[in-house]
Image: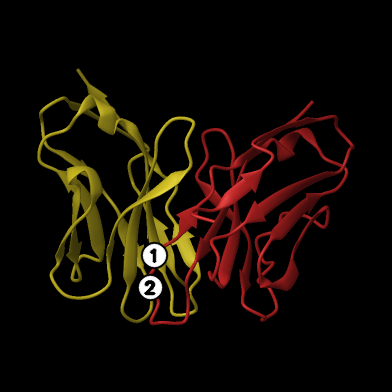
Chain colours: A yellow, B red
Amino acid sequence: AQSVAQPEDQVNVAEGNPLTVKCTYSVSGNPYLFWYVQYPNRGLQFLLKYITGDNLVKGSYGFEAEFNKSQTSFHLKKPSALVSDSALYFCAVRDPGNQFYFGTGTSLTVIP
Amino acid sequence: GAGVSQSPSNKVTEKGKDVELRCDPISGHTALYWYRQSLGQGLEFLIYFQGNSAPDKSGLPSDRFSAERTGGSVSTLTIQRTQQEDSAVYLCASSLAGTGGAYGYTFGSGTRLTVV
């Protein structure tokens, strides 16, 4: 069965420091992996995706994610966090039937 | 339209009443999904429409919940005899499928349902 795990409900980081939001997955076949962000009182927005190719994927707002097949991980990263990055982040995996599976979300707080 | 449109944006209803939530996906997107996001919870899958195929209803929490998609476009999620635990943000998303699955979702801004 396909599944996505975000082991941290909450991540706090100081402004200017690097941030990591963790995601691991379980999927049959080659995974299609996604990150979405939800800012307060807004709908979810697409950040980035991994389909194939380079393991380091760059996305919106300076975010990037690294696909690690051996560890079945797709952690979201940013070299220098901004207060405006504070939001809820969801990792998702797509199965061959185009069904998406979401993690439970990680609330990121960037402290000024 | 340019994005996924959901209406109403907010709905307050009395316990026991029926509600209808509407989703207008991006034109040409064959896949449409409904999710529910409760306070402090992640995204809960409800139902998935793909083209003319029978929908995947496996996420609907009870028989009070139903959804339809007319003409492969607009979808309506109906909740009958609403309960307080139905209070949540209901999110609709659409995607362009059938070309190797390289696409993610586009989400609507959601309908915040409050049952009082």
Give the mark toward the camera: 1 or 2.
1
Q: Which one is earlier in the sequence, the residue at label 1 or at label 2?
A: 2
Q: Position of residue B61 (x, y in %)?
A: 72, 54
Look at the numbered disc 2 and give the secondary structure of its residue.
loop
Nearest to the observer: residue A11 or residue A49: A49
Amino acid type, mark 1: Val
Residue at the spot x=65%, y=60% of the render? B59
The image quarter containing residue A110 is top left
Residue at image mark 1: A93
In the image, which disc is placed on residue A27? 2
Residue at the spot x=39%, y=65% of the render? A93
Relative to A53, is B86 on the left or the right? right
Mark 1 vs 2: CB contact within 8 A: yes
Nearest to the observer: residue B1 or residue A59: B1
Circle 2 residues within 10 Å: few <14, some 14–19, many ≥20: some
Q: Quadrant of the C terminus of chain A?
A: top left
The image quarter containing residue A80 is top left
